[in-house]
Amino acid sequence: MEPSLKEWIVARALEEGFSKVGVCAPDAAPQTAGRLREWLGEKRHGQMGWMAEREQWRGSPPALWPEARSVIMLAESYAPEINPLAVLEQRDRAAVSVYAQGKDYHDLVKRRLKRLARWLIDEARRQGLTCEVKVFVDTAPVMEKPLAQAAGLGWQGKHTNLLGRDIGNWVFLGSIFTTLDLPKDEAEVSHCGSCTACLDICPTRAFPAPYQLDARRCISYLTIEHHGPVDEELRPLMGNRIYGCDDCLAICPWNKFAAQAREIGYSPRVGAPPLAELAMLDDAGFRQRFSGSPIKRIGRNRFVRNVLYAIGNSAEAGLAPVAAGLLSDEDATVADAARWAVARLV
């Protein structure tokens, strides 16, 4: 018996390098709209105004594309080979999130999704079916994690990230919306149990309760999305994390089952560079150094702001002159961060 179209899709997706694939209906996570509305109402999205601007689409995938009948959800592993928390002890060096160590995942995942989507159109045509598709990776108004849980890939843990018993939580998510009416998978349920490791390790206490995140206290948000000065109360808690934070991901015990990363583009190339070296970057130097990296999206000023906070947290008096050299920076936020760092070190 020839495999069904869905079986072909799963096999092809795994060949492309995805770790897991599942299918759900566009309306398979009806609770999403209410939870999103509540989260926005509590202002926990901080300065991410785009979360509210397209709330209707985020909360209701059918509103995004009414013709869609199925959502193919895919997870791709970027699991690190070494413990990403070890660098936190090297206070004079920069801690960069695992996801940003290699090439920009948006480009890599979307390229793979587009290949799969083109194949799907051709295969459906071969079977006498008409097929339209839309491909999304993170930047579109799609709530990937609830859909991924509905498609059986895993569940949203107490740290609000997706994790699975067979893939861990080091995964990128992508989706293919299609007009094909494919068989749906069974939704996954939480297997976090009584574990609170991810909540307990958070440096800034960004989780008001299990399964809830206040982005305004999250280091990933503060270093990537937040513009302007960070509250002085939170700066010391950021340590040497200059781009993102992996604490809640790295501590999850389900990672012992994490799928190995297959994409060579995710191999570390940023590393843990000296803070003094990064603080000296001008705009051109920043762009050149982080070409092809997700880090480039925050720009030089926000990046150097983060580096200066890390310098202020380093307890390395020898870095005070580095910070002092930026006291007159043209960017007011950078200059403010430099003043704070110098005051902490002298």
Image: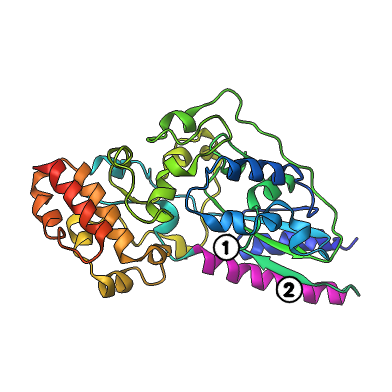
Query: Is residue 274 in view?
Result: no
Which of discs 2 and 1 lies nearer the camera? The answer is 1
User: Which amino acid does the dot numbered 1 rest on?
Assistant: Thr
In x, y percent, where is residue 174? 63, 59
In x, y percent, where is residue 197? 48, 29
Classify mark 2: helix, strand or loop. Answer: helix
User: Marks 2 and 1, Cα distance to the nearest angstrom?
Assistant: 23 Å
Q: Is residue 172 above or below residue 150?
A: below
User: Which amino acid does the dot numbered 2 rest on?
Assistant: Trp
In x, y percent, where is residue 292? 41, 71
Disc sitting over residue 139 in the figure: 1
In x, y percent, where is residue 336? 22, 53
- Depth check: give the residue in front, 145 or 253: 145
Is 4 inside the magenta-drawn segment? no
Q: Residue at x 48, y 41 (%)?
A: 249
Query: Is residue 199 in view?
Result: yes
In the picture, measured across the screen, residue 69 lies left or right of residue 119, that is right
- Depth check: give the residue in front, 36 or 262: 36
Q: Residues within 10 Å of mark 2 (few under 14, many from 20)?
A: some
Q: Of callouts 2 and 1, which one flags the residue occurring earlier in the amino acid sequence?
A: 2
Q: Residues within 10 Å of mark 1 (few under 14, many from 20)?
A: few
Disc sitting over residue 119 in the figure: 2
- Residue 305's quadrant in the figure? bottom left
In the picture, measured across the screen, residue 111 lies left or right of residue 181, that is left
Where does the magenta region start and end? 105-126
**Overall secondary structure of the magenta section:** helix
